[in-house]
Image (cartoon, rainbow, N blue to C red):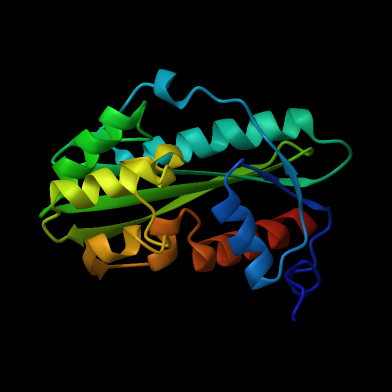
């Protein structure tokens, strides 16, 4: 496998500031070596904005900055955040089972937009943010399907109360317009090109 740390000539180790197993899996899958810190950010306390791309970029940057405080030595810290928006309503992670059912009922039969932001920062106090959005259409879901999915526990740690990468959540999605990995929680092409340019500036 190509090691992207070497290909991009990263001057410092890469640190992922995220508790998400999906982001960790994606980074490993495409060939990054990295360590992990778990930033404690209260996302619900961040004021919402109808500039949804800037909203997710801001939270991603808060995670990256907190991750930088937790890391040791010179490093490049990656933060990321994902949210789901339907008709101007932000649908983050459900607070409980009933909230998960409510969110899935709202998404049923409708088209929503998934926004994922990324942020990079270093101990040299350089920062950059970027984001992508993808439109996702759900077929109409039965109450039995919603109940079964919530009973599985899978929706509880996911924005919009679903994961397109899940073996069951995937069957809710009838159409996607845009980057699949934005829905999963880390637009990998955007990350690669942003990190590449970030490193080039770092080395100037």
**Foreground pick, 91 / 164:** 164
Instruction: Indicate left or right for 24 with 185 as reference.
Output: right
How many numbered marks appear?
Answer: 0
**Residue at the outermost right position:** 73
Q: Residue visible at 71% across and 62% down?
A: 200
Q: Residue visible at 48% across and 51% down?
A: 130
**Foreground pick, 26 / 58:** 26
* Image x and y of residue 123, in percent: 79, 37
**Residue at the outermost top position:** 45
Q: Quadrant of residue 89?
A: top left
**Can residue 194 be seen?**
yes
Q: Is residue 52 above or below residue 110?
A: above
* Image x and y of residue 163, in percent: 39, 54
**Can residue 83 be seen?**
no
Task: Classify the position of the N terminus by image quarter.
Answer: bottom right
Task: Classify the position of the C terminus by image quarter.
Answer: bottom right
Q: Quadrant of residue 170?
A: bottom left
Instruction: Indicate left or right for 155 with 32 as reference.
Output: left
Q: Residue visible at 26% across and 29% down?
A: 98
Q: Quadrant of residue 169?
A: bottom left
Q: Residue visible at 80% across and 46% down?
A: 75
Q: Is residue 80 above or below residue 47?
A: below
């Amino acid at each position: 496998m190509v090691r992207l740390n070497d290909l991009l000539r990263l001057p410092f180790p890469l640190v992922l500031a995220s508790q998400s197993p999906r982001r960790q899996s994606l980074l490993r899958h495409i060939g990054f070596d990295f360590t992990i810190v778990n930033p404690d950010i209260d996302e619900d306390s961040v004021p919402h904005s109808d500039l949804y791309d800037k909203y997710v970029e801001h939270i991603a940057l808060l995670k990256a900055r907190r991750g930088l405080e937790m890391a040791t030595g010179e490093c490049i810290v990656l933060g990321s955040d994902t949210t789901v928006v339907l008709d101007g309503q932000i649908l983050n992670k459900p607070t409980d089972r009933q909230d998960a059912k409510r969110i899935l009922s709202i998404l049923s039969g409708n088209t929503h937009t998934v926004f994922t932001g990324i942020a990079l920062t270093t101990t040299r106090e350089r920062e950059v943010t970027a984001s992508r959005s993808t439109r996702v259409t759900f077929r109409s879901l039965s109450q039995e399907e919603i109940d079964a999915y919530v009973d599985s526990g899978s929706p509880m740690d996911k924005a919009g109360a679903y994961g397109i990468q899940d073996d069951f959540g995937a069957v809710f999605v009838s159409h996607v317009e845009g980057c699949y990995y934005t829905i999963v929680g880390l637009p990998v092409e955007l990350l690669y090109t942003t990190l590449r340019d970030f490193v080039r500036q770092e080395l100037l």
